[in-house]
Amino acid sequence: MKFPKVHSLEEIANLLNCEFIGDKDFQVLGMNEIHVVEPGDIVFVDHPKYYDKALQSAATIVLINKKVDCPEGKALLISDDPFRDFNTLTKHFKPFQFANVAIASTAEIGEETVIQPNTFVGNHVKIGKNCLIHSNVSIYDHTVIGDNVIIHAGTILGADAFYYKKRPEGFDQLISGGRVVIEDNVGIGALCTIDKGVTGDTKIGAGTKLDNQVHVGHDTVIGKKCLIASQTGIAGCVVIEDEVTLWGQVGTTSGITIGTKAVVMGQTGVTKSVEGGKTYFGTPIEESREKLKQLANIKKIPEILSKLK
């Protein structure tokens, strides 16, 4: 997430009421999670296990809960609670905007697009040309939708990321300030849920088709011309490359990649990254031929035990 204008390190430190290490005029351009940071971004880290990863990332400003040596060319913000202060920044630069009409006045809607009754279109939403949005769809603020997109009834675009920190008193939510971006010619079935990114974008590539009741987690990037069948659950920060097929009730863990033109058969649990151009099945996931051989051999166990007796 980029800020509307460039800020200085001192300005951000004053906003958070925290110490800083580095030039007070050091430029701060935005904030992002570790997997999408760029120079000029703030990244937060609150556990020693991840200090090195954050300090050595592309981010040039590190919001951290301990004074450490500052890498050359970077700056530090020293906070007693980086998680809390990252939320403070999100609330400041991307505050929640109340809406009291079905289609916000700041929404941009292209020619020949049809929006059926009882649909909500939030603030600063952009919808392209020749789209068909069926009834009872909720399109949260800042969502971007391309041309020739069809979205069926009951779908929700832009709900918060499922991202929490465990506190003694309960779970503390990491506030989402990202977007959902839907490219041209995408089809989205009924009752799908696509969460926005924490600071970046959740993306659905051009020509991809989602069946009913598909869930897409925060910051996931789905490529072009993919087919995703019903009741599939895709976790956060997943990369699904072009022309992938996921059949019904597939589930994935977070932070993995499914390669181009991979086919994942129904009810498979994608527990790790997999190469493209192959067919997979089972939990834990394996190439389908190997998995089916294993299942065939399991069926022989009673016969083998009988012979051993």
Image: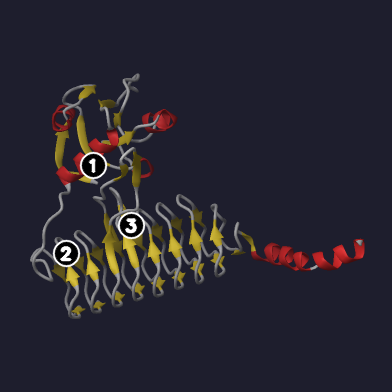
Compute the Cα span from label 2 to label 3: 17 Å
Q: Where is residue 13 in the image (x, y as percent from the top left)?
A: 17, 28
Q: How many C-alpha atoms fall within 10 Å of the one at disc 3: few (<14), some, or many (≥20)?
A: many
- Tag 1 secondary structure: helix
The residue nearer to you, when weighing 43 against 160, is 160
Q: Position of residue 159 (x, y in %)?
A: 27, 59
- Residue on which disc 2 sits: 122
Which residue appears at 37% of the width and 64% of the height? Answer: 205
Of circles 2 and 3, which is in front?
2
- Residue on which disc 1 sits: 87
**Disc 1 residue type (three-letter):** Asn
- Position of residue 12 relative to residue 198, above or below, is above
Compute the Cα span from label 1 to label 3: 19 Å
Can you say which quadrant of the picture contains the C terminus? Answer: bottom right
Of circles 1 and 3, which is in front?
1
Disc on the earlier residue, 2 or 3:
2
**Disc 3 residue type (three-letter):** Thr
The answer to which image quadrant residue 58 occupies is top left
Of circles 1 and 2, which is in front?
1
Residue at the limit of the structure toward the front, as seen here = 169
Compute the Cα span from label 1 to label 2: 22 Å
Mark 1 and mark 2 in contact? Answer it, CB < 8 Å: no
Answer with left or right where residue 259 lies relative to residue 291: left
Give the colour scheme of this rendering.
secondary structure
- Tag 3 secondary structure: strand
- Residue on which disc 3 sits: 202
Mark 2 and mark 3 in contact? Answer it, CB < 8 Å: no
Number of dots carrying numbers: 3
